Image: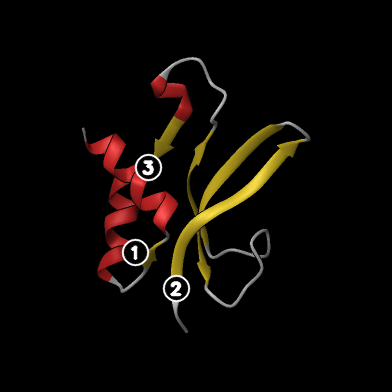
Amino acid sequence: MAVTIRLARQGAKKSPQYLIVVVDSAKKRDGAHLKALGHYYPKAKTAKEKLQIDAEALKAWQAKGAKLSQTVGQLVKTLAK
């Protein structure tokens, strides 16, 4: 089972909100996930409200072999700055 850390879309039309989730890579985008690691609200006013991730859990899942999606990888880079 290949495990991926990616975004799962939520929210209303034209008001996107995303959960950062650990999921089997064969599952659908918004399907069942193994664990939620945080959330991303692209329309939030402040950077702190925009992105929140449990960094320790993220590192633990990566140590177990989970791969980051391209988008989540870019978000994690901005968080590290």
Q: CA distance from mark 1 to mark 2?
A: 9 Å
Query: Considering only vertical position in the picture, is 44 above or below 61?
Result: above
Helix, strand or loop at mark 3? helix
Please report whichever mark, 1 or 2, sits nearer to the chain's N-terminal start: 2
Characterize the local packing of mark 3: few (<14), some (14-19) or many (20 or more) Cα atoms within 10 angstroms: some
Q: Which residue is mark 3?
A: 75
Residue 62 rendering spot, x and y as whole percentages? 30, 64
Please report whichever mark, 2 or 3, sits nearer to the chain's N-terminal start: 2
**Cβ atoms under marks 2 and 3 closer than 8 Å:** no
Disc ID at residue 3: 2
Disc ID at residue 61: 1
Identified by mark 3, the residue type is Leu
Please report whichever mark, 1 or 3, sits nearer to the chain's N-terminal start: 1
Identified by mark 1, the residue type is Trp
Eye-nearest disc, 1 or 3: 3
Helix, strand or loop at mark 2? strand
